[in-house]
Image (tube, rainbow, N blue to C red):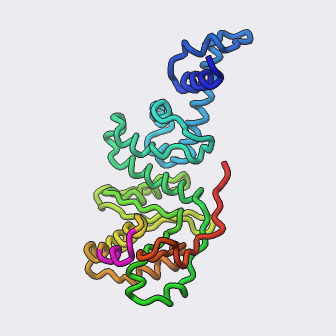
């Protein structure tokens, strides 16, 4: 068996896969090799479960820590880490919970998890320098309409039929235990991003949400305005653009008529270390 094959078999066994191909190569050092493998496996699952719990603390509170450990065990076996950075692990958990039969009665749980993943993503996203608004002021209305704006890498947009922001607020560790949430109050369209070192989120009106969603997908500003007015005929594009600038969420712009970026403000980008 090559060193690479040995490594692959050991990793698979640690995550609950077959043991037969790796146990003969484990030095027991006074302990049965299978028992030593079980110890290693326990440590791996415990570490990954704690990493998931750190990313999804409100999900843990909603389902109880013991149930979360059970769900995490099933998730880890199906979705092992693909890299060494534990804060990057767990992106698939919201979709996993949406299809996990034991969570079926908690229809809002997966969307709460999506909110918590967006917050984790915002916390660890790259830095980017906001666009100087004077650059936009120098363009004509036609030129602005054909721009594709680069939004801050920490930004996420989430839409849910449940009041997931209220659920999250009511289930934080320091929340008032008497707080209640009316699940029938309607859904929420949320914008999550990092401002300086703080992760913030807020509700966004339907028109503004549609506007941001088109821009986030790389669409032109004119198309974003059309989508926003389809959602809300009273949508004010000037105010919406000002809101994005005030939050420092526009970090670059390029003309749809040209391939290279123009007025791009994305500079001094850093990626956090593990």
Decide if residue 150 is on the left or right side of residue 235.
right
Magenta highlight: main SS: helix
Closer to the camera in the image, 185 or 224: 224
Q: Position of residue 228 (x, y in %)?
A: 31, 74
Query: Residue visible at 61% across and 65% down?
Result: 127
Q: Position of residue 116 (x, y in %)?
A: 49, 53
Q: Position of residue 242 (x, y in %)?
A: 46, 82
Closer to the camera in the image, 163 or 20: 20
| Residue 153 higher or lower than 84, as above or below | below
Provide the residue span drawn in magenta: 219-226
Write down the quadrant of residue 223 in the picture: bottom left
Decide if residue 197 is on the left or right side of residue 253.
right
Write down the quadrant of residue 190 in the picture: bottom left
| Residue 144 higher or lower than 184, as above or below | below
Query: Residue visible at 65% across and 16% down?
Result: 36
Query: Residue visible at 46% across and 79% down?
Result: 243
Decide if residue 179 is on the left or right side of residue 199.
left
Write down the quadrant of residue 49 in the picture: top right
**Which image quadrant: the N terminus?**
top right
Q: In the image, is residue 53 part of the stretch drawn in magenta?
A: no
Q: In the image, is residue 224 part of the stretch drawn in magenta?
A: yes
Query: Residue visible at 55% across and 55% down?
Result: 174
Question: Is residue 204 at all visible to an observer of this figure?
Answer: no
Closer to the camera in the image, 39 or 80: 80
Closer to the camera in the image, 211 or 163: 211
């Amino acid at each position: 068996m090559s060193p690479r094959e040995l490594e692959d078999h050991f990793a698979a066994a640690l995550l609950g896969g077959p043991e037969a191909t790796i146990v003969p190569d484990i030095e027991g050092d006074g302990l049965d090799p299978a028992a030593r493998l079980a110890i290693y496996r326990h440590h791996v699952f415990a570490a990954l479960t704690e990493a998931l719990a750190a990313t999804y603390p409100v999900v843990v509170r909603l389902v109880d820590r013991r149930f979360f450990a059970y769900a995490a065990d099933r998730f880890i076996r199906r979705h092992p880490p693909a890299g060494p950075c534990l804060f990057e692990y767990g992106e698939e958990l919201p979709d996993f919970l949406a299809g996990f039969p034991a969570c079926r009665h908690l229809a809002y749980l997966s969307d709460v998890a999506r909110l918590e993943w967006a917050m984790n993503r915002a916390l660890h996203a790259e830095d980017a320098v906001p666009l100087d608004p004077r650059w936009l002021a120098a363009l004509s209305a036609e030129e602005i309409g054909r721009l594709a704006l680069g939004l801050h890498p920490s930004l996420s947009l989430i839409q849910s039929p449940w009041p997931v922001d209220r659920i999250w607020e009511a289930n934080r560790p320091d929340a008032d235990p008497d707080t209640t949430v009316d699940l029938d109050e309607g859904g929420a369209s949320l914008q999550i991003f990092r401002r300086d070192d703080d992760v913030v989120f807020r509700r966004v009106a339907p028109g503004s949400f549609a506007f941001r969603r088109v821009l986030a997908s790389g669409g032109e500003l004119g198309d974003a305005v059309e989508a926003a007015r389809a959602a809300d005929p009273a949508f004010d594009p000037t105010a919406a653009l000002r809101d994005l600038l005030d939050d420092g969420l526009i970090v670059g712009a390029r003309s749809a008529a040209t391939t290279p970026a123009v007025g791009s403000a994305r500079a001094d980008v850093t990626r956090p270390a593990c």
